[in-house]
Image (cartoon, helix red, strand yellow):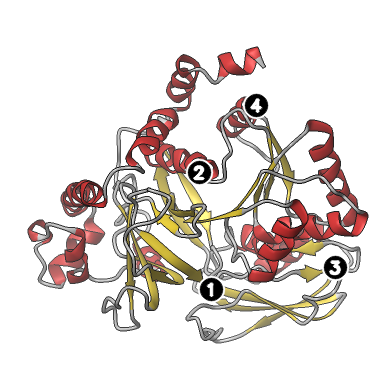
Amino acid sequence: MIMKDILLSQPFLTLADIISLQPISSYLRFYQECQWWPLEKLQDLQNNRLRELLHTACGGVPFYRDLYRSAGINASELRCVDDLKKLPIVTKSLLKRAYPSLCTRRTFWPSREYFTSGSSGAPFAARVDSLTMGEARALMLLRAQFSGWTLKDPCLQTGMSLQRGGVKRLKDLLLGVHYVTAYDLSDKNLDSYLNIIEQHGIQYVMGYPGSIYALADRAERVGFSLGMKGIVTWGDNLYHNYRQKIEGQFRCRVTDTYGCGEGIQVAAQCEMGAYHIFMPHVAVEIVDDDGVPVKRGESGNVLLTRLRPGAMPLIRYKIGDIGRLAVETKCGCGRGFDMLTAIHGRDSDFIFTPGGNKLIVHFFTGIFEYYQGIEYFRIIQTDPDKITVEFVPNDFFDDKILASLEAEIHTKGDPALRINFNKVDNIPLDKTGKRKIVLSNLINRS
């Protein structure tokens, strides 16, 4: 414990920031303080950062300069977040056509490419620099702290890749993270996760709701009785029955969070149940299908503006989710951040395999996001040993992609799973305005 106290002291955290070129600890200290600022002070900071963002984007990114010029908009005249509605909405399709030469820029900080398809089923590449990612990772720590977790508390985390880079391995070491795969949710693996919790006295579990739901279900079936202090979920939709099962089995509150792989952490749920928006980092708009802002309390399309330009500015970016701003702007928890009351449309139904595995939505997005020859995809299961993959190809598509996809699904999921690929012209939106990735008639199978 003494060694951990030393490793988590501010001098060592600062050294880690310097080595990783990601000022995570300094951002975390800032957000730990500013979350308690009054709303008006946070709005002033948002507006100042927005003006700097627009100046940078229009001056150094041809995509935004040309987009606003063709719309007859002088972005320098915009003064506050409320003025964002005057700007065109940006979609993944627009950015994909401009990527990378027209929509990215050079920064002082090193950058890398992140692939994401979220829950929309549309593969997408975004370039994020280390400064921007450092802020996002600081917010990942802050959102965990909403559950009561501290830097000294070990935790079990479910994730999609066990290939941890240097920064992540250092984080795991410093924070006592036991990182396990959410790819394989077989009973054998779930039992090993429960053993890790028991052997290491872990009281916090974090990761995808689908995987933690599967863990809670297994814990109930084997009579695992240890309670937790907190659960933190991200990435998929936290269904009501998922929350009930997890909270009932582990006897603690679930802290749900909201973000995207493009380097944006949006919000986290406090003890009062509200999703607090990380206002210095992101501006959130809720608009109707015509792009017109809806009233607070009404559902609509989520638009995100990351207030740090980074290597690839994202301004009025249509993420593909449906959300709702809270009617009230003050929360009983005392935080000053504005609030969302709901985020809809993220999917985490299971696909069951012949070998007993359970594949969550991020199993598939974690594979398909690297195949940009596929515009959209959907997984359909009506039989326990077979899936149909519907896909919409684009100009980058090659038939060889399908063989690679099949091999990867077999290797990471289950080689006994039969896969049928079906090329289609379109995958329709559901009633929430999103393309549901997983359609399974076996969701209630245990």
Cα separation between marks 2 and 1: 22 Å
Kind of residue sitting beneath label 3? Thr
Instruction: Specify which label sits upstream in the sequence, 3 or 4.
Output: 4
Q: Position of residue 162 (x, y in %)?
A: 70, 42
Q: Is residue 185 left or right of residue 372?
A: right
Kind of residue sitting beneath label 1? Gly
> Residue at image x 46%, y 60%?
274
**The one of 280 and 120 positioned closer to us in this rendering:** 280
Instruction: Specify which label sits upstream in the sequence, 3 or 1.
Output: 1
Crowding near the residue tagged with mark 3, few <14, some 14–19, many ≥20 C-alpha atoms within 10 Å: many
**The one of 280 and 230 positioned closer to us in this rendering:** 230
**Which residue is the site of mark 3?**
353
> Residue at image x 38%, y 60%?
339
Kind of residue sitting beneath label 2? Met
Q: Position of residue 104 (x, y in %)?
A: 32, 51
Instruction: Specify which label sits upstream in the sequence, 2 or 4.
Output: 2
Tell me if residue 320 comes above or below residue 310 in the rendering: below
Q: Is residue 161 left or right of residue 37?
A: right
Tell me if residue 199 comes above or below residue 358 in the rendering: above
Cα separation between marks 1 and 4: 35 Å
Q: Which of the 4 image quarters holds residue 256?
A: bottom right
Contact flag, marks 2 and 3 (Cβ < 8 Å)? no
**Which residue is the site of mark 1?**
345
Q: Position of residue 425 (x, y in %)?
A: 55, 87
**Which residue is the site of mark 4?**
173
**The one of 225 and 69 positioned closer to us in this rendering:** 225
**Which residue is the site of mark 2?**
140
